[in-house]
Amino acid sequence: MTTTLTQRVCKSYKVLVGLEIHVQLATKSKMFTGAANGFGGEPNSQVDEVVLGLPGVLPVMNKKAVEYAMKVGLALGCKIAKHTKWDRKSYYYPDLPKNYQISQYDLPLCYEGSFEIPGEDGNPVRVRVRRAHLEEDAGKLLHEAPGGYAIDWSIVDLNRAGTPLLEIVTEPDLTTPKQVAAFGQELQKLVQFLGVSEGQMQMGHMRFEPNINVHITDQDGAVHKTAITEIKNLNSFSVLERATAYEIQRQIRQWEETGDLGRKSTYGWDEPSESTFHQRDKEDADDYRYFPDPDLVPVEPSDEWVAEIKGQIGELPAARRKRYVGALGLSEKDAAILAGDREIGDFFEQVIAGGAEAKRASTLMEALREMSNEKSVPLMKLGVKPVRVAEIAALVVGGKVAASKETAKKIIDALAQGDRPAEQAAADLGLIQSTDTGAIDAAIDALIAQNPKSLQDYKGGKLTALGSLVGMVMKSGKGLNAKLVQEQLKKRLG
Ligand code: MN
């Protein structure tokens, strides 16, 4: 009897990842009741009869949550359903008092979208969005009492139960772990820009579940497709990227070692061992016994309503970023920073409207950002008006103050303490430069008398010496305008 050892070698492979993302919407009240929707608070303080699922209560749809969901859907290029409804997804778990979650099954509010993210090579990657639907969150099971007391049973906090959740599902268009993380980050920026979610990962506002499989080409050119696995509940971009990378390699390794392509199943991520672990096999259709919720009316967004929401979205970060690079000539990096936050982008545009040239306005925004970091005060709360920043730009252009970030920061700091014309603030700080040519000439005379060596260097053709000469004149006289000093020097030295 002979045995044949089959060698399996992965010659090349193609990765297919689709993402499911749950985003908590920052509405004031919950999805189907007026109970407060917010993080923190005493356990079970943000609940009412509806959240508790008491007999006889009726849910009422939160219109704001539907609007927020439509905003995200439209920003993701989705179509908005003309007719959608609410379905009960039944399962029994202690954090779900009704024993069903209200969700949307076959008729999601938003569908067939497409979203571009920056790729690793600089080219945009297009990711199709299958659907985005609304549902309610479950409560939280705690295995430790508040205050850290050990208990040998579990307790439930229903503050999170009933929070509006937007579940976004992409097609498997992501092909690398970095792309997966990039999608998450772009989506975070988007929901923050739209003002529909705080998008704070550490607070669980966004939870990611990558669905991963690999098409392996072996040494004979045959293609082997691994079964799709889903990694549950990842809530940091770093974990999202590392878990995806690990799972791709795990599937390839498993096939190489055993020939097993795996089964459709659910995995978890274990941070201490930096690996995924098997949780359960997944039946093709989980038996959630979906059926339309008889207590809620269908939602039929009118064209007018959708148009109104569309009008509120305005220019999206990606479009703004492109415009800042293309039309305003900013660097990709500066454009990304300014366009990433709606208020900061608006502020920047007001500085330009105040007369500042775009690149100078961008440099001044950088000075504002640094001040904001140094003071630990959000930029918008520094108390500096855009028009004042435009005035600083004019002072620089007019040669009245030095063209340096340090000077700008000093003026900004003074303006943050009390609003007044930027020129007055600069004058109070003694930053107004002298444009008195008599004083400049006197300083140059003194320099010529004291530094014959530098002068010889310059006359001998060392043009770089001019900079050091200017520096010396600036030091010798007080508050002289560097540009005028340079002009006068050139004239005097021929
Ligand atoms: Mn869900």
Image (tube, helix red, strand yellow):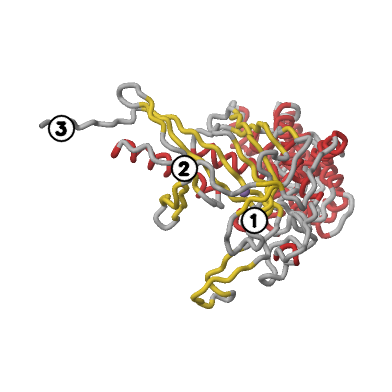
Amino acid type assigned to the residue bearing label 3 in the image = Thr
Q: Which residue is mark 2?
A: 229
Of circles 1 and 2, the one toward us is 1
C-alpha span from label 3 to label 2: 33 Å
**Residue that sits furthest to the top in the current view:** 221
Q: Residue 22, labelled with which disc? A: none
Residue 438 shows up from this direction: no
C-alpha span from label 3 to label 1: 54 Å
Of 245 and 141, the residue lying toward us:
141
The N terminus, quarter of image: top left
C-alpha span from label 1 to label 2: 25 Å
The C terminus, quarter of image: top right
- Structural crowding at the residue carrying mark 1, measured as other residues with C-alpha within 10 Å and reported as few (<14), some (14–19) or many (≥20): some
Q: Earlier along the polypeptide chain: callout 1 or callout 2?
A: 1
**Residue that sits furthest to the left in the current view:** 1
Of 269 and 383, the residue lying toward us:
269
Of circles 3 and 2, the one toward us is 3
Amino acid type assigned to the residue bearing label 1 in the image = Tyr
Q: Which residue is mark 1?
A: 100
Q: Which residue is mark 3?
A: 3
Q: Secondary structure at mark 2?
A: strand
Whether residues under marks 1 and 2 lie with C-beta atoms below 8 angstroms apart, the answer is: no
The percent coordinates of residue 77 (x first, y second) are 71, 32
The percent coordinates of residue 345 (x first, y second) are 76, 41
Query: Is disc 2's CB within 8 Å of ligand 1?
Result: no
